[in-house]
Image (spheres, helix red, strand yellow):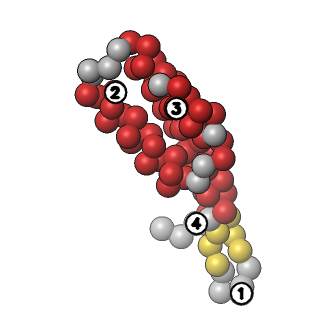
């Protein structure tokens, strides 16, 4: 599991798609339930880091979402009153 730990240490640098793909892979391995406890814990810790990374990236993406107004200005998504 040493290899997995070194990958999870780099989670803060991964793009969203790669973080999400690695998180899905970890979940599949944990769901198989045929791992020793120590390996399961290592995978769980790596998954927590990847899930946090995905959350941060999604929050940043949400902040970048804007609505173009007819006059060419940008409005925060949360400021729109259109349905």
Q: Locate residue 47, reporting x and y percent.
A: 48, 32
Tell me the element at label 1. Answer: loop
Q: Is residue 21 above or below residue 42?
A: below
> Which residue is rendered at x = 47% and y = 47% of the image?
20
Q: Residues within 10 Å of mark 2 (few under 14, many from 20)?
A: some
User: Seen in the image, is 7 located left or right of residue 79?
Assistant: left
Q: Are marks 1 and 2 in contact (CB under 8 Å)?
A: no
The residue mark sitting in front, 4 or 1, is 1
In whole angstroms, how far apart are the C-alphas of marks 4 and 2?
A: 43 Å
Q: Is residue 68 above or below residue 63?
A: below
The residue mark sitting in front, 2 or 3, is 3
Tell me the element at label 4. Answer: loop
Q: Nearer the viewer, residue 7 or 71?
A: 7
Q: Which residue is mark 4?
A: 81
Residue 63 in sight = yes
Q: Nearer the viewer, residue 30 or 4?
A: 4
Where residue 71 is drawn, which disc sits there? 1
Residue 75: name its quadrant: bottom right
Q: Earlier in the sequence, mark 1 or mark 2?
A: 2
Q: Are marks 2 and 3 in contact (CB under 8 Å)?
A: no
Q: Locate residue 27, reporting x and y percent.
A: 36, 34
Where residue 3 is drawn, which disc sits there? 3
Tell me the element at label 3. Answer: helix
The residue mark sitting in front, 4 or 2, is 2
> Which residue is rendered at x = 43% and y = 48% of the image?
21
Residue 7: name its quadrant: top right
Q: Is residue 63 above or below residue 46?
A: below
Q: Locate residue 62, reporting x and y percent.
A: 60, 57
The residue mark sitting in front, 1 or 3, is 3
Q: Earlier in the sequence, mark 4 or mark 2?
A: 2
In whole angstroms, how far apart are the C-alphas of marks 1 and 3?
A: 53 Å
Q: Which residue is mark 2?
A: 30
């Amino acid at each position: 599991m040493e290899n997995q730990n070194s990958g999870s240490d780099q989670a803060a640098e991964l793009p969203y798609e790669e973080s999400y793909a690695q998180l899905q892979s970890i979940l599949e391995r944990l769901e198989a339930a045929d791992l020793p406890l120590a390996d399961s814990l290592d995978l769980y810790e790596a998954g927590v880091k990847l899930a946090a990374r995905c959350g941060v990236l999604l929050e940043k993406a949400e902040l970048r979402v804007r609505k173009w107004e007819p006059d060419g200005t940008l409005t925060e998504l949360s400021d729109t009153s259109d349905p």
